[in-house]
Amino acid sequence: MSVYTPKVAFVTGATSGIGLAVTRTLAERGISVFGVARHADNVTAVVDKLRGEGLDVDGTAADVTAPDDIRAAVSAATERYGRIDVLVNNAGRNGGGETARIPDELWLDVIETNLTSVFRVTREVLTTGRMLAGPAGRIINIASTGGKQGVILGAPYSASKHGVVGFTKAVGLELAKTGITVNAVCPGYVETPLAERVRQGYAEHWDVSEQDVLEKFQAKIPLGRYSTADEVAGLVGYLVTPAADPITAQAINVCGGLGNY
């Protein structure tokens, strides 16, 4: 049996946090990476930096909540590299508060960003990105331990990530015979710019310091610390290897023992 070796990856939210770590990890393994993010300046800076390190990276600005942007970005990646072998749906946002006071606009934007974009980008990569043309492929969705249990004051976020987990399992089963695996990586607390914004939000709501919030969160983690973006990217890197061929329709935690499920 021939070993499937992916050559091209498409990564959303590729310029910061987990997305940047994934972009670097895959590129260091010899995979050409086409990354997208909302701000063109950030995309250019990351592409220039990683190319300066000898990595094959390209990208463009795209808002994953805009269908036209998704189509244009996937088309650009396909024209550049011919086919997309690996999709990493990483772009996302936080969002919540007291449910009785959450406006429709916030709810809808969190769902659109975290869940609907995963569907739209996946659909576009399967078709325009030629993943369905075979011989195989890898779809990896960055979900959250909040996609398996409730997050206090985070109903929109938790609902969206539960949706990502359900979408992953359904599409993984659907595509199982095609050679395309579909899995979710579920980080717990990860030290990223997004994590800083989350702590700021809780500090405001609870009227405590951000350090107090950090200590409260760390106390819940059996390992006693946040995971790193590189550690999350390490699991993504494993899921594109031949050793991960039989793994599909799974949601795998990277959380320091926070989620024992």
Image: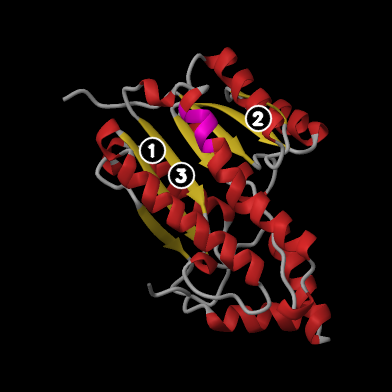
| Farthest-out residue, left | 1
- 10 Å neighbourhood of mark 3: few (<14), some, or many (≥20)? many
- 10 Å neighbourhood of mark 1: few (<14), some, or many (≥20)? many
Inspect the image, locate mark 2, and give the three-letter code of the amino acid beneath it: Leu
For residue 148, side relative to residue 172 (left or right): right
Whether 171 is among the magenta residues is no
Choose mark 2 or mark 3, whichever is in front.
Answer: 3
Instruction: Tell me the residue at 33%/42% (across/down).
Output: 174
Task: Kindly report the distance in space between the C-alpha atoms of the residues bearing marks 1 and 3.
Answer: 9 Å
* Residue beneath disc 3: 140
Inspect the image, locate mark 1, and give the three-letter code of the amino acid beneath it: Val
* Residue beneath disc 1: 240
For residue 174, side relative to residue 66 (left or right): left
Q: Position of residue 10 (x, y in %)?
A: 55, 31
Q: Position of residue 167 (x, y in %)?
A: 45, 51
Q: Compared with residue 9, is residue 102 higher up or lower down, i.e. above or below?
A: below
**Is residue 24 visible in the rendered structure shown here?**
no
Q: Quadrant of residue 77?
A: top right
